[in-house]
Amino acid sequence: MKTILLIEDNRDLRENISEMLDLAGYKTETASNGKLGLEKAQTLMPDLIICDVMMPVLDGFSVLRILSNNSVTAGIPFIFLTAKAEKTDFRKGMSLGADDYITKPFDESDLLNAVELRLKKIELAKHAEEDSAFHDFTSFFNDKEELEELKELSKNFDTKEFRKKEIVFTEGSHCNGLYYIQKGKIKTYKTNDDGKEYITGLHKEGDFLGYVALLENTPHTEGAEALDEAEISIIPKQDFLKLVYNNAEVSHKFIRMLSHNLKEKEERLLALAYNSVRQRVAEALIQLQDKYQNNPKEKFSIAFTREDLANMVGTATESLIRTLSDFKEEGAIEIHGSTIGIKDKAKLERIIA
């Protein structure tokens, strides 16, 4: 059972919210002011904190600031609860690392949905590391160096060069082989009837493309386009299928990759359904860093068009630009022309956690 700490100075509201959470299956601990709440947070280490902003002794902003500066409590999801809806208060809370901001009065469903989403995203984050290496070509072949079939297959690659913005394959086209990215960055995407594009994935050197269509024996369900100059090797369809059917280890590897692919898309659908634009933009920026940063010790920056980033987030370009401006003012990112640099990844992570 998940434990939620509720810090609220209004007795009636505190009791009502506590009852809501108890009925929803959570264990609820309460505190009547910020000082008591801070002490309970450091002692109980709850799974999530809901905190009023305006309180005696210690206000909500101070509570969050102290918890965020403590490495032990910094990762606890934090939802602000307030009767004040001014933009300055909202931005102050988000800049301190709040995960959500609920304005009184609110519906019970709004509060419970926010709580459920925060807790679910924490659980997903715990499993992210174990799923992170499924698409890496180098480790795939290094793990299977003893397999002569793979060694022989690697000699048969036909390599093709692609210019920036050149189409690799189109949605609905016939799949002729397994694509392996030797060099460059590739995006996969889907389009609706009006031609509006949504980016479904980002790929780099060492990634596979097209294996879903091959294994399911269907046309490509999404298109692929080069984000910069790229080189892609194509393993003929029959050679790939022969290897999968005849080698259980290779077959199992690609089944795991399919499973990861499905899970990743489910998580993105969840984010589209419940996350704010701020959260989706922060998540997209972190995804870009995780995918394309070559040296973790160096500050990350990438030239990425605003249109592509908006298509990745699933929002209008104008909304994206406003959100990027907010992130820049809050010190999370820096912007130089089309290049976006991440200054404080922890701030972005607190937004999406």
Image: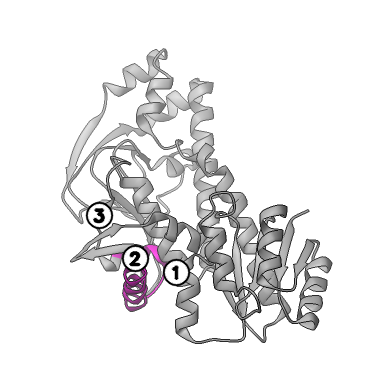
Q: Say whether marks 3 and 2 touch (CB < 8 Å).
A: no
Q: Say whether marks 1 and 2 touch (CB < 8 Å).
A: yes
Q: Say whether marks 1 and 3 touch (CB < 8 Å).
A: no
- Write down the residue under mark 2: 331
The disc label shown at residue 302, or none: 3
Amino acid type indicated by mark 1:
Ser
Magenta segment, principal secondary structure?
helix
Query: Badge 1: how crowded within 10 Å, few (<14), some, or many (20+)?
Result: many
CA gap, disc 1 and disc 3: 23 Å
CA gap, disc 3 and disc 2: 17 Å
The mark closer to the camera, 1 or 3, is 1
| Start-end of magenta stretch | 308-331
Amino acid type indicated by mark 2:
Gly
- Determine the secondary structure under disc 3: strand
- Determine the secondary structure under disc 2: loop
- Determine the secondary structure under disc 1: helix
Residue 333's place in the image compared with 56, above or below, is: above
Mark earlier in primary sequence (1, 2): 1
Is-magenta flag for residue 2?
A: no
Query: What residue is rendered at 32% in x and 78% in y?
Result: 318
